[in-house]
Image (cartoon, rainbow, N blue to C red):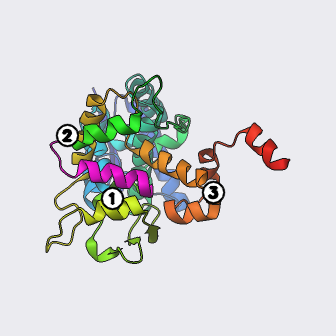
Amino acid sequence: MQEQLSTDHQCNTFDTRAAAEKWVRAVEYEMDQGIFVSRAEAESTTLRELLERYKEEITPLKKGVASESARIRAFLKHSLAHRIVASIRGVDIARYRDARLKKVLPATVKKELVIISHLFEVARKEWGIHVANPVRDIKLPPHSKARERRLQTGHDGEKSEESRLLEACKGAKNPFLLPIVHLALETAMRQAELVSLRWENIDLNRRTAHLPDTKNGESRDVPLSSIAIRVLRSLPRGIHGQVFPGLTTEAVKRAYIRAVRRAGIEDLHFHDLRHEATTRFFELGLNIMEVASITGHKDLRMLRRYTHLKAEDLARKLG
């Protein structure tokens, strides 16, 4: 039989009377010392309720609203979502981590756990729910090795991957896929930045595209190559002002995946086009500060891997 005891309107339920009395003594001690904090809400609120509130109040304030919302919706289906938050321990989060690592990449699991960790911090600091953060008690998955995938040149009469990709994009049902991929290779813009382009922010005479709101929270101006200018001039303009009206990142993602498949290319993500473009900037002779101003990288250490400097090339420069 479960024992239920209360002290000064604080209630809890236990399997044994001994456990209940121990809890009462602890609460009374904290009250006497003036350090008592009510755990009632943490002991009556499920993780699902917190997740739904977080999705409503916190997620819309972030850049990656769509992707984070999708992760939260997926987590809502997990059994942990039905648990009372006060009962969730580090070991529970560790089990979730280990199970997910068998299905998805470490980077994906880490993003999910970062959301859960932030949720617990917001609940404690801003929503007044006295609950410990169980994510802090476990080790997050390590960083995945940064991708260095480049478009391969053709050998023995075979077309290059770039040629095959562009041909596949040209035959796509989505008419915007080809110009999007062209611009990605010419500007190193992120997918979301390309999709959100507006004509009012593009100056074809000055050959610049202004990005008022980027991933790192700062605006930047991107120089446009002759090819980028030609691509933009080929696009129709409408009163809506969008360069790619009605296009979403999800639509680009799906069309791109199908194009890569048709081109017979393996393991080429859309984000790899940004890596390819950035590397080409260095190959053109631009220095690291010039490249950073184009790509928007705030941490110059992130750009070091793009240079692909070879010892023999450096030796020739040394003379």
Q: The residue under label 1 is which amino acid type? A: Leu
**Which is in the foreground here, disc 2 or disc 1?**
2
Q: Gap between marks 3 and 2, in whole Å?
A: 34 Å
Q: How many marks?
A: 3
Query: Could you say where residue 218 lies in the image, as x and y percent from the top left?
Result: 46, 70
Horizontally, is 2 left or right of 308 in the view? left
Residue 280 versus residue 261 in the image, above or below = below
Residue range in magenta is: 171-188
Which element type, helix, strand or loop, lies under badge 2? loop
Tell me the residue that label 3 is attached to: 285
Quadrant for the N terminus, please: top left
Contact check, label 1 and label 3, Cβ < 8 Å: no
Tell me the residue that label 2 is attached to: 171
- N-terminal of the pair, mark 1 or mark 3, is 1
* Residue 161 in view here: yes
Q: Gap between marks 2 and 1, in whole Å?
A: 20 Å
Q: Gap between marks 1 and 3, in whole Å?
A: 25 Å
- N-terminal of the pair, mark 2 or mark 1, is 2
Check residue 67 for magenta coloring. Answer: no
Q: Residue at x 22, y 60 (%)?
A: 244
Contact check, label 2 and label 1, Cβ < 8 Å: no
* Residue 2 in view here: no
Magenta stretch: helix, strand or loop mostly = helix
Query: Could you say where residue 166 lies in the image, as x and y percent from the top left?
Result: 31, 42
Tell me the residue that label 1 is attached to: 194
Which element type, helix, strand or loop, lies under badge 3? loop
